[in-house]
Image (spheres, helix red, strand yellow):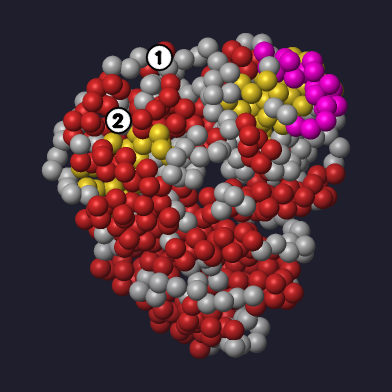
């Protein structure tokens, strides 16, 4: 806990501002401390820090729910934007939830905006969402999207996951505004309820398509040799880059490429394959000069949904042909993207209409071409008394039903085991400590820990020290599966019907290790337990991986060249394909 925060805010100062009715000053002080916690994630709390946190949360909730404390409307908007930070701070404190204070607010006048600031996925008290939109749809819309930031770690808890799923089921025709938090709903809903995410994504796409700026005509004079790559993720450590760089490199050999970089500048941006770089960031006023005029024959989105810019642009007609792929492998469900690049070896063809609103175009192989990890193995594995099981699951992939599976594995294990979760950098705004607490409460502190935000080389060293890896489900990993297999670690993959829970299984098939693929939860438990109890079997798998030729299997580049041919085909045959009835996969 930083000293400047500790010294600058005392209960006496807060109480004095309230007693003297200096409400604007009080709101400013509270907002300042909340912004600090939004910007600085704490990885642990010592006794002094926990005391400070409890004192702050106690006074914040007490003063914020005083009936005569009415911040200005702009300040209340800021408090609503800080809803996820407030939720995380309260979860870190001895209060755990704001339930009691929401109940207090329900009996007050002028309580609407305050309820929106305090009500999150961690609450168990019932709130009628329709009533919130009846009261003031603009603020309710802002709250609806801010609420979705709870997907960062929130799927791990039984109650929070249920709340997120209930939030997904609710939609209101008055939810028509665009704000800076809409992408959290678009991105996060898949992790909360992958079977119903299309309902919310279609709603959000319609909102963007009806938005005033979306009516601005884009001047496009297509040149068959010009393609735009549209992403915020084109830097070497990002999984989108790692999984699609070989495809883009192949395209650069046949086309002139423009990189449209989305969002804020990134010093690690790789511009080496591009003849031109443009930058687009949502702002007020909205400046579309990076997009129009253009001469692109194809607008290629390797990912959509990880930022607001990609959602907006996927709902414009930037080029005659618009394509998405596996960078973040979830259909847009209703944008203006025409085609989805899918791996012939991975896609479940009988599910293509349910999985994609775009027309599926089958690419030879897996539909991705991962880069070799930038890491030299240390050879630092040494078996220990406690078996280390690596769960390289970004935070949103950790969900309560899967944790229950791990709890059952733990209960059935005849030897000491330890689950280590590597959650990436998702647990911002102080979601780390509450998420760790949920996991450790379920599995037990001796049996689980959470590692968050460490450098890639440190993460790879930790995976190397582990005994084997488990994949997440229903949203599995691909780059993380590559990492594990590159380090010759056995990897259990739970295969489903969508790319994001089929890709890891496809890697195992390439290596001739289909025995590590399961298709239901019971089999997942049984295979994990066999790997725990049978050292010989685990050693046999490790030896098979050690002898595998990864260059001829995982890192084979033959499929990448086909993407350029497919893009050429689509340019030449788009009119014909568009005129065909139905959406049968295009198999070139």
Residue highlighted by disc 2 = 489
The residue under the point 72% across, 49% down is 202
Vertical relation: 139 (above or below) 521? below
Vertical relation: 46 (above or below) 224? below
Q: Element type at marker 2?
A: loop
Would residue 110 be found to the left or right of residue 448 on screen? right
Figure quadrant of the N terminus: bottom left
The residue under the point 44% across, 31% down is 505
Magenta span main SS: helix
**Figure quadrant of residue 90:** bottom left
Q: CA distance from mark 1 to mark 2?
A: 17 Å
Q: Element type at marker 1?
A: helix
Magenta region: 565-583
The residue under the point 45% across, 73% down is 97
- Asked whether residue 107 is drawn in magenta, I would say no
Q: Earlier in the sequence, mark 1 or mark 2?
A: 2
Q: Where in the figure is residue 424, as x and y percent of width and height?
A: 41, 43
Query: Is there any visible trace of residue 60 in the rendered image?
Result: yes
- Residue nearer the viewer, 458 or 348: 348
- Asked whether residue 568 is drawn in magenta, I would say yes
Query: Is there any visible trace of residue 14 in the rendered image?
Result: no
Q: Where in the figure is residue 206, as x and y percent of width and height?
A: 77, 50
- Residue nearer the viewer, 107 or 363: 363
Figure quadrant of the C terminus: top right
The residue under the point 58% across, 18% down is 364
Residue highlighted by disc 1 = 551
Vertical relation: 357 (above or below) 297? below
**Figure quadrant of residue 386:** top left
Would residue 485 be found to the left or right of residue 232 on screen? left
Q: Where in the figure is residue 47, as x and y percent of width and height?
A: 25, 68
């Amino acid at each position: 806990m930083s000293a400047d925060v500790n010294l600058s805010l005392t209960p006496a100062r807060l109480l004095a501002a309230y007693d003297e009715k200096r409400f604007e000053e009080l709101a400013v002080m509270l907002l300042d401390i909340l912004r600090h916690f939004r910007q600085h994630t704490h990885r642990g709390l010592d006794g002094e820090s926990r005391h400070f946190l409890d004192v702050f949360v106690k006074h914040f909730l007490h003063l914020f729910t005083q009936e005569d404390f009415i911040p200005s409307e702009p300040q209340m908007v800021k408090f609503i934007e800080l809803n996820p930070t407030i939720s995380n701070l309260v979860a870190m404190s001895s209060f755990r939830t704001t339930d009691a204070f929401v109940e207090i607010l329900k009996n007050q006048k002028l309580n609407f905006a305050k309820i929106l600031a305090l009500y999150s996925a961690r609450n168990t008290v019932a709130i009628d969402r329709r009533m919130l939109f009846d009261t003031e749809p603009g603020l309710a819309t802002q709250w609806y999207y801010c609420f979705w930031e709870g997907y960062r770690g929130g799927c791990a808890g039984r109650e929070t996951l249920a709340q997120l799923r209930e939030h997904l089921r609710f939609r209101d025709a008055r939810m028509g505004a665009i704000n800076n938090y809409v992408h959290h709903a678009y991105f996060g809903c898949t992790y909360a309820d992958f079977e119903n995410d299309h309902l919310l994504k279609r709603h959000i796409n319609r909102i963007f398509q009806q938005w005033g700026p979306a009516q601005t005509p884009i001047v496009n004079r297509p040149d068959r040799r010009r393609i735009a790559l549209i992403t915020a993720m084109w830097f070497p450590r990002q999984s989108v880059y790692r999984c699609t760089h070989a495809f883009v490199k192949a395209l650069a050999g046949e086309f002139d490429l423009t990189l449209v970089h989305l969002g804020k500048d990134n010093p690690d941006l790789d511009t080496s394959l591009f003849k031109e770089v443009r930058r687009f960031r949502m702002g007020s006023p909205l400046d579309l000069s990076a997009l129009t005029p253009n001469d692109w024959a194809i607008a290629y989105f390797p990912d959509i949904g990880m930022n607001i810019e990609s959602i907006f642009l996927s709902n414009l007609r930037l080029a005659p042909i618009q394509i998405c792929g596996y960078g973040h492998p979830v259909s847009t469900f209703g944008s203006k993207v025409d085609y989805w690049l899918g791996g012939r070896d991975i896609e479940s063809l009988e599910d293509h209409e349910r999985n994609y609103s775009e027309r599926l175009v089958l690419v030879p192989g897996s539909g991705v071409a991962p880069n070799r990890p930038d890491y030299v193995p240390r050879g630092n594995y040494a078996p220990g008394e406690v078996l280390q099981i690596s769960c390289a699951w970004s935070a949103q992939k950790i969900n309560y039903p899967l944790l229950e599976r791990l709890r059952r594995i733990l209960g059935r294990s005849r030897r000491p085991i330890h689950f280590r979760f590597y959650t990436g950098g998702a647990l911002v705004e102080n979601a780390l400590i509450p998420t760790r607490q949920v996991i450790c409460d379920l599995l037990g502190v001796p049996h689980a820990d959470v590692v968050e935000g460490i450098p890639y080389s440190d993460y790879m060293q930790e995976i190397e020290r582990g005994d084997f890896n488990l994949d997440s489900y229903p949203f599995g990993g691909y780059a993380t599966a590559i990492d594990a297999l590159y380090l010759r670690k056995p990897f259990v993959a739970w295969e489903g019907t969508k790319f994001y829970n089929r890709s890891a299984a496809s890697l195992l098939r390439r290596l001739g290790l289909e025995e590590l693929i399961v298709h239901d939860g019971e089999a997942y438990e049984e295979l994990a337990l066999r790997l725990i109890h049978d050292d010989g079997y685990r050693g046999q798998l490790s030896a098979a991986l050690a002898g595998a030729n990864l260059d001829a299997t995982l890192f084979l580049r033959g499929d990448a060249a086909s993407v350029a041919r497919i893009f050429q085909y689509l340019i030449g045959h788009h009119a014909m394909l568009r005129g065909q009835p139905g959406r049968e996969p295009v198999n070139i």
